[in-house]
Image: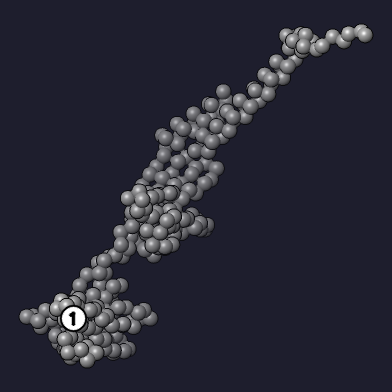
Amino acid sequence: HFGFAVMIIGVLASSAFSVSEKVVIEKGGAKPAGNLSVTYLGLAADIETTNNEVLLSIASGGDTTQGRPQLYFSQRMGGLMKKPFISRSVLKDVYFSPEEIKESRSEPLVLKKGEKSTLGGATLTFEGFDMGQHAGNENSMRVAARIAVETGYQKVEVAPARVHQTKADGTHETIMQPAQLQLNGQTYQVTLASILADQGAIVVEIPGLTDAGAETLILDVSTKPLINLVWAGAILIMLGTLVSFIRRSGEVSQSPASKVAATSLTPTPTRG
């Protein structure tokens, strides 16, 4: 009975005083959640990898814990599978449940010939086209856009290209040839997305520089106080049941009826 009472207290306390909040955290950033600070470090693997984990750093005062809740897309189930990370303590449990990952997307950048555009601490200028055949193929046309990239200490030129060619069966295809850009110690891929001939401009995409927003995590953080009383009560109930069973078994074996039954089953020796 005492164990049952402890379990009921735990259920009522965790239900009545449970607190839940959703936080949106950019990759590499930190957000407060109650008296904790949660940093989203990224994914351990691709979102479609079974048992993929979300990497969290959870700071409380001067202590830091690494949390690894699971979040992955299951082809078999046709949806996201989730498993929270639980930070346990004597007085409360804190559940970190990932809800969704919103990935960054690259927005196109329009560059007009001769005009300067500032992006990521660099100045980009579209200077013109280089055109010619691709690998000596008469049925192809390669168009490269010369883009000057200036920072405070360097000036480089990149030339992303598009190859338009006619295949043997008469169909047409376009091959993208991105250019690499070294900027501030990082390597970016510059893609010539399209050519706006009527405007004298080009459209380029540079993932990491032309992103609409950083990758973000939507995380549910739930605090359940005194949840340990539920488990303590359940354990006490099991122990109480076991003790009662052992005691009852002993009482039955020592009862007079048991002794009489045992005597009646004992065979009487016969004299030969």
Q: Secondary structure at mark 1?
A: loop
Estimate the x, y position of residue 264 in percent, counting from the top left. Answer: 77, 8
Q: Quadrant of residue 108?
A: bottom left
Q: Amino acid at mark 1?
A: Ala
> Relative to 215, does residue 147 appear above or below in the rendering?
below
Estimate the x, y position of residue 53 in percent, counting from the top left. Answer: 43, 57
Name the image colouring.
Answer: one colour
Q: Does the rendering let one see residue 36?
A: no
Residue 211 or 76: which is nearer the viewer?
76
Say left or right for 247 vs 28: right
> Relative to 94, does residue 58 appear above or below in the rendering?
below
Q: Quadrant of residue 182?
A: bottom left
Residue for point 63% across, 27% down: 242
Residue at the far right: name it: 272
Residue for point 46% across, 32% down: 11
Residue at the far front: name it: 272
Residue for point 32% across, 50% down: 78
Say left or right for 182 vs 129: right
Say left or right for 240 vs 192: right
Q: Quadrant of residue 201?
A: bottom left
Estimate the x, y position of residue 200 in percent, counting from the top left. Answer: 10, 83
Residue at the far left: name it: 198
- Name the residue carrying label 1: 168
> Relative to 136, does residue 230 appear above or below in the rendering?
above
